Each structure stands twice: as structure tokens, then as C-alpha cells.
Image: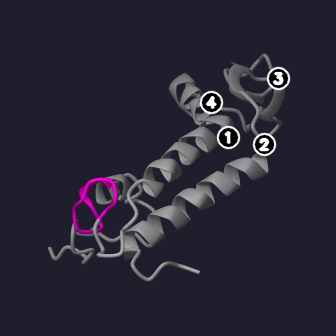
Amino acid sequence: MVDQRMPEVAVWLRSTIEGDKAAAEAIGAGVWTVAKAGRAELDELAILDDGRPIIDSGWEGGGVYDADVAHHIALHDPRDTIARCEAELAELDRHQPNFAGDCTRCDQVAPCEAVVIKARGYRHRPGWKDWEPHTGQERKP
């Protein structure tokens, strides 16, 4: 059950972060690395999970051709995503509204700026609204 004092932005943000964490946990917590793809005649890169290919070349392609893209994918492996989500959830826990509706961490009217700023990092996700700090209302253009 959701605390009725919890601002909409905080509820949405927690749900979004928990969803990312659950998706990463479902994949596993292996270490992703970049390696040359299986078909040597192609300039493809593979993504490996503890040495096991998870993105590799095939007859129809399937590898990654851009080294920057491959390294970006590997940097955001499930292990990293889980750790980042746990840290973000811990920080969100520190910014709960108290009995008067103020943030227990920064003594601002909830939602405090810290929660709204963190939510902006997920602004390309479904359900995003450009919330105002302290009121929780959606910004008007």
C-alpha cells in the first residue's frame, strides 16, 4: 500500500527504479565484456556475460559493429544496473515525507528538489511528467 503522503513523482520514480532492478535481476548479475564476435570474417563485436556470448554474430548478423556501442552496452550490465538501482532506492528512502509533508532529509516541502531532479534522469520513460519541486504539480509549458 502506498503512503498517501508520498508525492506522485516519488511513487513513479520508485516504481521505475524497482522495474529496472527487477529486469536486471531476471537477467543475472554476470560481468559483461566486449570481445571479437564468433565469425572472424566479419568486423563484429560480441557482448559476453562471464565469458558466455549473449550478443554474437550469426548468419544474419547480430553482433555489434560499433566499438563505442559495444562498450556502452557492457558498461550497463545487469550487475551495474542492480547496484545503481539499489543506491538510488536508498537515496529515495532518505527523502520520505514526514507527518507534516516535509522531506525528512532536507526539510523542504515534499517532493523536495532532490527527488524531482533524480526523476528527471528517467524523463524518457513512460509516465514521466515534468514535476515541480515542493508542489508535485506538473509544470505548465
Q: Which residue is mark 4?
A: 74
Of tags 2 and 4, the one toward the viewer is 2
Q: Nearer the viewer, residue 56 or 22?
A: 22
Q: Which residue is mark 1?
A: 78
Q: What span is in magenta?
A: 103-114
Q: Which residue is mark 2?
A: 28
Of the two numbered discs 3 and 4 on the same chain, state the one appearing first in sequence. Answer: 3
Q: Do tag 3 and tag 1 residues touch (Cβ < 8 Å)?
A: no
Please name the predominant secondary structure of the magenta segment in the image. Answer: loop
Of the two numbered discs 3 and 1 on the same chain, state the one appearing first in sequence. Answer: 3
Q: Amino acid at mark 4?
A: Ala
Placement of 31 over or under 1, stated as above or below: above
The spot of residue 53 in percent (x, y) is 81, 30
Residue 130, quarter of picture: bottom left
Q: Do tag 1 and tag 2 residues touch (Cβ < 8 Å)?
A: yes
Of tags 4 and 1, the one toward the viewer is 1
The alpha-carbon separation of the residues under discs 3 and 4 comes to 12 Å
The alpha-carbon separation of the residues under discs 3 and 1 comes to 15 Å
SS category of the residue bearing label 2? loop
